[in-house]
Amino acid sequence: MLTTVDEKKHRRPTIRRPKPATPERPNTDIVNEHKTGAFNEAVSISQFRLETSNGAVKLCTFIGEMHAQILDCCDSTKLIKNSMYVADRLDANKTAMILLEYGHEGPYGIGSNCVAELCNAPDSKYKESKRIIGIDDRSVYLKDGRCDQSILYDGDTLFCVLKKLDLANIKVYISNNYIKPIESSFTENNQKYLSAPGIVSRFLRHIYASKTAISSKLNGMTTKADNAVYELILDLRYLWSFVVDIRILITILHGDPAVDEYVCVVGSKHWETITNELSNPVASDIDITRVTHETHTKCSCIKYQSLSAIA
């Protein structure tokens, strides 16, 4: 019979396995900015905190601008250009992505100081950055690409084109160049998002409803009077502006999970649409909270310290 001492000698030793290490979560704390200064190009700024069902957190900053317009700031001596803020975020957060309003042709053809200074200036260190992407997909879907986009948005160009046509050919021209691309190539590329509940599918339905309304108006036109043509052009401009907005929404809500910060600099109308959509979330697996909403009024410019940032 084994003694207590013998039992201890012959007992199988207990192997204590180390506990698996808990994977370190990325630093996604959102804190108040402490930098000073005022934005002299931003007419509006909104920020949203996004948290998915698995706990991943993103900060999305949307800056609305009038593109080449410089604002009068009466209450600050330190002025912050939009490109300066974007550069700050690129340097501070190595996973931040920047969304700018240019097309697949490259950062050209739009009068945005931010685009010019970051992407085209000879001394910009961000010219070749893979973390700056263009989100204007309109020329991808339009029948004649950038030409159709320029005709639609450049002053009275489309009005002058249409006034040379009779009513029947106006309907054919608009249908072929601006209605059918939404029904074909745009739908083919974005159909997959319609079935997923959330903001993207809701906004896609809004785009299709707008397209249907314009088609009905076009089919019912009985005159090519100036006011009728101008109204049609305005409707088309709104419809195709939504193509930029849906690309932004898809990028931030269905994009790279490794990105914890987006900064988007766009025209003020795009800013308004995106801010409204994200301010009215629908049932989905993403929790959305607006943390900043600032606008320029008279000569009171938006303060840098009113913003939040990824720590």
Image: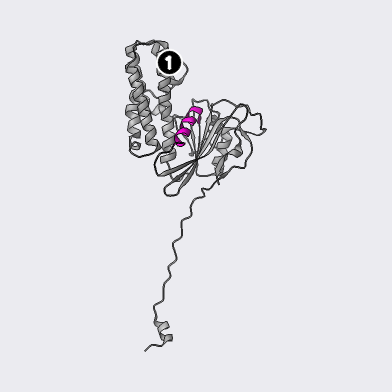
Amino acid type for the residue under numbered disc 1: Tyr
Question: Is residue 265 rendered magenta in the image?
Answer: yes
Q: Secondary structure at mark 1?
A: helix
Question: Picture coordinates of residue 226 (x, y %)?
Answer: 42, 11
Residue 147 visible here:
no
Q: Nearer the viewer, residue 232 or 263?
A: 232
Question: Picture coordinates of residue 123 (x, y %)?
Answer: 58, 34
Question: Is residue 294 rendered magenta in the image?
Answer: no
Q: Quadrant of residue 31?
A: top right
Residue 309 visible here:
yes
Figure check: 32 above or below 7: above
Residue sitting at 44 percent across and 66 percent down? Answer: 18
Residue sitting at 40 percent across and 84 percent down? Answer: 7
Q: From the image, which quarter does the N terminus lie in?
A: bottom left
Q: Nearer the viewer, residue 292 or 240?
A: 292
Horizontal arrangement in the rendering, residue 244 relative to residue 124 (left or right): left
> For mark 1, does the 10 Å Cα neighbourhood hold few (<14), some (14 to 19), or many (20 or more) residues?
some
What span is in magenta? 263-280
The residue at which mark 1 appears reads as 230
Question: Picture coordinates of residue 157 (x, y %)?
Answer: 44, 16
- Residue lying furthest bottom in this view? 1
Which scheme is used to colour this image of the protein? one colour
Horizontal arrangement in the rendering, residue 296 relative to residue 285 (left or right): right
Question: Picture coordinates of residue 298 (x, y %)?
Answer: 61, 26
Report the magenta stretch's main SS.
Answer: helix
